[in-house]
Image: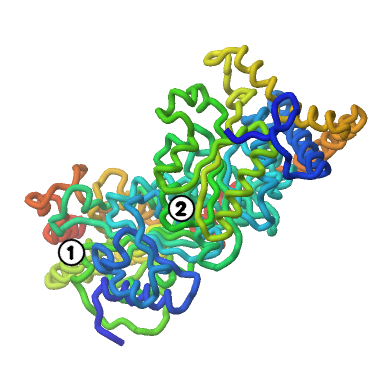
Amino acid sequence: MFNLINPDGSVRDRLPVTLDEMKDLYAAMVEARAYDDKSMAMQRQGRLATYAPFRGQEAAQIGAGAALRPGDWVAATYRDAALNWMAGYPWRLLILGRTGDERGGQVPEDVYVLPPSITVGGHMIHAVGLAWAEKLKGSSRIALTSFGDGATSEGDFHEAMNFAAVYELPTVFLCQNNGFAISYPTVEQTRTETIAEKAEAYGMPGVRVDGNDVVAVMVAVKEAAQRARSGKGPSLVEALTYRIGPHTTADDPGRYRDEAEVTLWEEKDPLTRVRRLLERSGAWSLQWQQTLETQASQGIESAVAWAEAIPIPEPGTLFTRMYAEPTPPLLEQAGEATHG
Amino acid sequence: MAELNIAQALNGALDTALSADDRVVLLGEDIGRAGGVFRITDGLRERHGAQRVIDTPVAESGIVGAAFGMAVAGLRPVAEIQFLGFSYPAYDQVVNHVARIRNRTNHRFTAPMVVRIPFGGGIGAAEHHSESTEAVYAHVPGLKVVVPSTPRDARGLLLAAIEDPDPVIFLEPIRLYRAVKEDVPEIYYKTDIGPIRVERTGTDISLISWGAMMKETRQAATSLEQSGISVEVIDVRTLTPLDRDGIVASVSKTGRAVVVHEAPLTGGFGAEISATIAERCLYSLQAPVARVTGWDTIFPLKRSEHHYLPSVDRIVSAAERTLEE
């Protein structure tokens, strides 16, 4: 397994990032965690629909996001808010979406991130199609799709991997192996030892990285992205990580896993190890940490305030966003819905 | 102007679209080298290249899902699924993504794409090759479902579907591919998606159908006309969005309606049309609406096909019963 930063903050090798870049990656993970914590709290207060927390997976998502260029496509899951945010999806729209508002899916024109796919696995092939279009257009943009270990059991995984490989499409497959498909452990889902080795069957490179090591993930995804951009086709990156929280706010993980296992993974926390690394370099202080947390929290709070201030959609909007122009049957129904 | 059958008209429309718009790409199983199972894409790979007329692995979900990604990224993909009975692996993509992306993103991302699917029975094909499950697509909000039954409409509707800013399920009646010929303009023209086509005007009864059953419906109309009955024949040709006004206008005039489709009765799209008539012009009706449809059975294999397919006689009898009221 490819790894650069150990849980105690020591490094395996010289890191290909500057200290400032390291601090930026850390700050991004702190901000992502603030979003995750806030979302969990809001869901408990009934202010958000079901929420799927990514606690423990910040390095995998922030590292992958940091490896992309502006204009690259991202097709990810409901647990990938941190990745989507790194790729340009504003927190305020992510929150608006989770309050139950389709306008949360209306990303700005210069953002190329699809709103989260809720069904499992169907979105991987979308990245393949997006990459295909870019290849046909002759652009240098690539597409990254993120999915969990559970999605690799879907037939869609096979079709997406095969299509991407057959046509040498500029696609990066990022599997965040977080240990569980809701309650079903990864080790029971597959007979292969790793997800990464499945790449071989498709004729593409596959690599397993320490998914809690933000720099290792960034390096691996950058390499895959570079390969894609230079016309050499797709790659699979397996980021081995762990879902510290429940599957969603509707889940009780106590039914299927030991608390001891969670504790073990908490010791490998992706934020803690970078903080330790920065401490070792003399680049971390409690004051800086507090500043980061305050700024993150303020940013998230203002995004929440913005989203919650958006008025509930008018009933007519149900009908106007179905087609470019509402069809006659929809116009008729809209009339009934809005005038009773 | 050239005299073409539906298969030729579709081939010509795809050729025209590929020439007119660089964003148009075709993808599907055996559509390149082989020219498609029904030869609808014959010669297009040679003319437009393997990059734009793409042979794909056997993976319907992959084909439609990849076409979706292409469409979101600005291309105009036209996917082919070989038979309607093979489209269900892609149904998840169609229902959960293709039909929804505009709504999910409040117009930010859209899927201007066409999924062409041959459908219907009557050619003695193997199991799964004779399905008429158009209603399962017509029931999905966010799609348009189009069914031509003439060469002219085939060309005009396909060009309109490719230009449409929203996803279109384009169902091609297998039995009619080579059954009828007519003069088809070679120019680029579009036939509006939506309006029904009144194929014959009449005053005594409306026969309403679409797709392959238009053939038997036309024959039934001719037979009824020989008995002195004035028959209006309607080719619905767009199932969604349904031209309710067009149907209601016809039935309000004739006071009698027979709806004909090859799909099974229960939950068939004829129920939607029948209900529309009942809701909007009940008091114009001289007789209850009749439906002549396939049975609520699995579509039979070759030796029993004729037991299943609605016959001209069944349509004529239904019309006569309706006229007796």
Q: Which residue appears farthest toward the front when viewing the image?
A: A13
- Please determine whether, in this image, residue A125 is positioned above or below residue A82: below
Q: Residue at x 35, y 50 (%)?
A: B59
Q: Is residue A29 left or right of residue A191?
A: right
Residue B216 circle label: 1
Q: Amino acid at mark 1?
A: Glu
Q: Position of residue A298 (x, y in %)?
A: 85, 36
Q: Is residue A217 left or right of residue A308?
A: left
Q: Within 10 angstroms of label 1, few (less than 14), some, or many (20 or more) residues?
A: many
Is residue B39 among the parts visible in the rendering?
A: yes
Q: Residue at x 25, y 46 (%)?
A: B265
Q: Nearer the viewer, residue B182 or B130?
A: B130
Q: Residue A213 falls in which quadrant of the image? A: top right
Q: Which residue appears farthest toward the bottom when viewing the image?
A: B1
Q: Nearer the viewer, residue A253 or A228?
A: A228
Is residue B242 among the parts visible in the rendering?
A: no
The quadrant the N terminus of chain B occupies is bottom left
Q: Position of residue B125 (x, y in %)?
A: 16, 54
Q: Amino acid at mark 2?
A: Ala
Q: Is residue A157 left or right of residue B229?
A: right
Chain bearing tag 2 is A
Give the structural element (helix, strand or loop) at label 2.
Answer: helix
Do labels 2 and 1 touch, CB within 8 Å? no
Chain bearing tag 1 is B
Q: Residue at x 44, y 39 (%)?
A: A198
Q: Residue A61 falls in which quadrant of the image? A: top right
Give the structural element (helix, strand or loop) at label 1.
Answer: helix
